[in-house]
Amino acid sequence: MTLSLAAEEVLRDCENALSFLQEETDPSKFRLFWLAAVAGLRSVGHVLDKVDSLEQPKLGAAARAAYSRWKQEPENNQIFWQFIDNERNSLLKEGEPAVYPVPHRLLIDADFVYDGDFDLFAPILKGPYIGEDCRDVLGLAVSWWKEQINAIKREAQI
């Protein structure tokens, strides 16, 4: 039987938020689900480090080693540094998501301006994922975390 981690539960919450975002047409609800997904994505690593690692010391060592690799190879982990971490900082520390629909203030400063139905296409408005639908990028981030967690679990032999 494979050990289920608290970080994996947080990641399932992110998948649920993504599912809601796929169907949402109300801008206020969309923003709320986006906030939940982005906060959850960054929380995965923190929960892995602060909760799961305490219960499984070998997992903690593997997680710390993985984080060191991500820092040494940012180009191979762009989704973490340029989306998961950056969007969390932009949204939670500055109150500005990099996705449409967004407050008017960002639309003025955005690298990419989109005027259309966000329920069909909700683009990232700045950064390396500019012009990509935010739900696609969120899906990439969820997949990246799944791969990382599985690799960490293999390394820890749990």
Image (cartoon, helix red, strand yellow):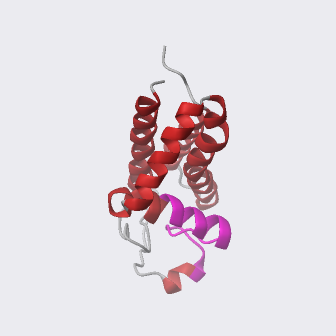
Q: Nearer the viewer, residue 56 or 133?
A: 56
Does residue 134 show up?
A: no
Provide residue 29's location: percent of width, then percent of height.
63, 54
- In the visual, does 106 lie left or right of 140? right
- In the visual, does 34 lie left or right of 113? right
Question: Residue at the location (41% across, 65% down)?
Answer: 123
Quadrant of residue 89 within the rendered picture: bottom right
Q: Is residue 102 magenta?
A: yes
> What is the residue that sits farthest to the bottom in this orientation?
108
- In the visual, does 44 lie left or right of 133? right
Provide residue 25's location: percent of width, then percent of height.
53, 54
Question: Residue at the location (38% across, 62% down)?
Answer: 74
> What is the residue that sits farthest to the top in this orientation?
1
Magenta span: 84-105
Q: Nearer the viewer, residue 19 or 2?
A: 2
Question: Residue at the location (56% across, 71% down)?
Answer: 102
Provide residue 155's location: percent of width, then percent of height.
42, 33
Query: From the viewer's perspective, is residue 59 above or below residue 40?
Result: above
Query: From the viewer's perspective, is residue 128 above or below residue 1?
Result: below
Question: Residue at the location (56% across, 38% down)?
Answer: 60
- In the visual, does 52 lie left or right of 68? right
Q: Nearer the viewer, residue 38 or 64?
A: 64
Provide residue 101's location: percent of width, then percent of height.
53, 67
Does residue 77 show up?
A: yes
Q: Is residue 122 magenta?
A: no
